[in-house]
């Protein structure tokens, strides 16, 4: 049997399915940043930062794509010259034929994403998202002429509709007959002005989180062939669970802040931690947020967390946490995120295998925290 050629767009599709771009913050830039979607692909190097070293490692290991946590491009470029590292990476990536992709805040918020991995590494169980973990869902029902259902459904899925647990592209379709009569001044896609038309249509149903509703409806209307799109929005009692910022859960056994700090240090392989709180304070309920998560400290305190583990904590945030009786462990931005490399390579490898895509995912070795403890 002829082997199917794998291309960069297969990788983008896999990444979008596991870590939907719709989960990313509005300021973020995730997905394919550099590269030709039609270029062939066999190996991907997974790393934390899109650095020149990482690109060089990808070239040396024969990887045609670099999958990073931090995006290379967030703000629009005013020029493209090799005078700074971003410019040099862009030049080299295009010349050497290495695509660059990012899974950033979508990886932070997704189920089986960075914060789930961080919580698991620290022995925090029974986890749920610290913020935004129970968003309201709506059922979106749209009536589509037969033959256009795939185009309309794909547009809705790409905008973030159709996720149920670990499944994406969820929909239900039933055949029926739609009727309508176009008034004067209309330009109907099917039928004539003033005449009643009967058309074979599909009732296409999917689910949408409320926060994504406007985007999903907008994309649906644009993909739909009709001038006037008939659709229903039905509020559901169901909630979308498992997706959101940070995680909160419990340790198998309560301990002290000092002992828990030692566990964190060992689990995350960091040289030093900055700790706010009493060494002997009891720690059972733990909140985590990889990277810069001090903005979640009020929410962690409100939900009764004993400690928040994150990075990039500022002085006044430390004072605020202390005043609320919330302990903080700052294990560094790098320290709380680097574990994504191994886990993302594994998750993507499993996802590729499940879809019959022969792609090898390699882990970047030797990435270093720019901060040293002296
Ligand atoms: Zn980060």
Image (cartoon, rainbow, N blue to C red):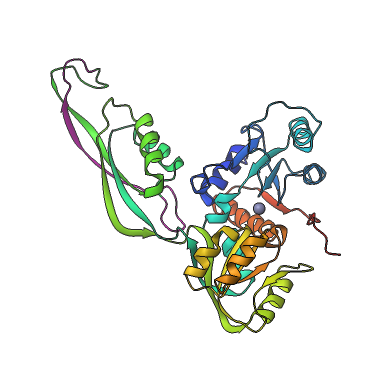
Who's the residue at 80% across and 54% down the image?
A: 370
Foreground pick, 163 / 353: 163
User: Going by the image, does 133 lie left or right of 265?
Assistant: left
Foreground pick, 264 / 116: 264
Image location (x, y in percent) of residue 164: 41, 55
Image location (x, y in percent) of residue 4: 60, 40
User: Going by the image, does 154 lie left or right of 18?
Assistant: left
Q: Residue 148: tell me if it is visible.
A: yes
Q: Is residue 139 above or below residue 142?
A: below
Q: Is residue 304 above or below residue 135?
A: below
Who's the residue at 34% across and 30% down the image?
A: 224
Q: Locate the N terminus by quadrant.
A: top right
Image location (x, y in percent) of residue 244: 49, 57
Foreground pick, 170 / 119: 119
Q: Quarter of the image holding residue 196?
A: top left
Who's the residue at 29% across and 33% down the image?
A: 146
Q: Residue lying furthest right in this view?
A: 374
Foreground pick, 261 / 345: 261
Q: Quarter of the image holding residue 295?
A: bottom right
What span is colored magenta in the figure?
163-186
């Amino acid at each position: 049997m002829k082997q199917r050629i794998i291309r960069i767009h297969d990788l983008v599709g896999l990444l979008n399915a596991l870590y939907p771009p719709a989960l990313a913050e509005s300021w973020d830039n995730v997905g394919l940043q550099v590269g030709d979607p039609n270029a062939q692909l066999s190996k991907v190097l997974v790393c934390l930062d899109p650095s020149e070293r990482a690109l060089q490692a990808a070239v040396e290991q024969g990887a045609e794509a670099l999958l990073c946590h931090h995006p290379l491009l967030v703000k629009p470029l005013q020029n493209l010259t090799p005078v700074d590292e971003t410019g040099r990476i862009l030049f080299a990536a295009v010349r050497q034929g290495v695509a660059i992709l990012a899974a950033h805040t979508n990886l932070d918020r997704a189920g089986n994403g960075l914060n789930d991995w961080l919580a698991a590494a620290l022995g925090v169980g029974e986890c749920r998202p610290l913020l935004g973990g129970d968003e309201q869902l709506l059922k979106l029902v749209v009536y589509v002429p037969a033959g256009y259902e795939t185009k309309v459904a794909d547009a809705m899925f790409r905008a973030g509709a159709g996720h149920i647990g670990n499944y994406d592209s969820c929909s239900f379709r039933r055949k029926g007959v739609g009727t309508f009569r176009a008034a004067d001044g209309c330009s109907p896609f099917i039928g004539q002005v003033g005449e009643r038309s009967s058309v074979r249509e599909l009732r296409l149903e999917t689910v949408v989180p409320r926060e994504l509703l406007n985007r999903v409806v907008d994309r649906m209307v644009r993909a739909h062939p009709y001038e006037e799109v008939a659709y229903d929005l039905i509020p559901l009692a169901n909630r979308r669970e498992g997706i959101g910022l940070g995680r909160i859960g419990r340790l198998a056994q309560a301990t002290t802040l000092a002992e828990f700090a030692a566990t964190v240090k060992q689990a995350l392989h960091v040289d030093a931690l900055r700790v706010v709180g009493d060494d002997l304070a009891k720690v059972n309920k733990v909140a985590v947020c990889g990277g810069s998560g001090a903005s979640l400290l009020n929410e962690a305190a409100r939900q009764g967390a004993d400690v928040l583990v994150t990075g990039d904590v500022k002085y006044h945030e430390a004072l605020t946490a202390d005043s609320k009786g919330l302990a903080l462990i700052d294990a560094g931005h790098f320290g709380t995120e680097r574990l994504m490399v191994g886990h993302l390579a594994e998750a993507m490898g499993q996802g590729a295998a499940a879809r019959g895509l022969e792609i090898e995912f390699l882990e970047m070795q030797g990435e270093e925290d720019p901060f040293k403890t002296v």
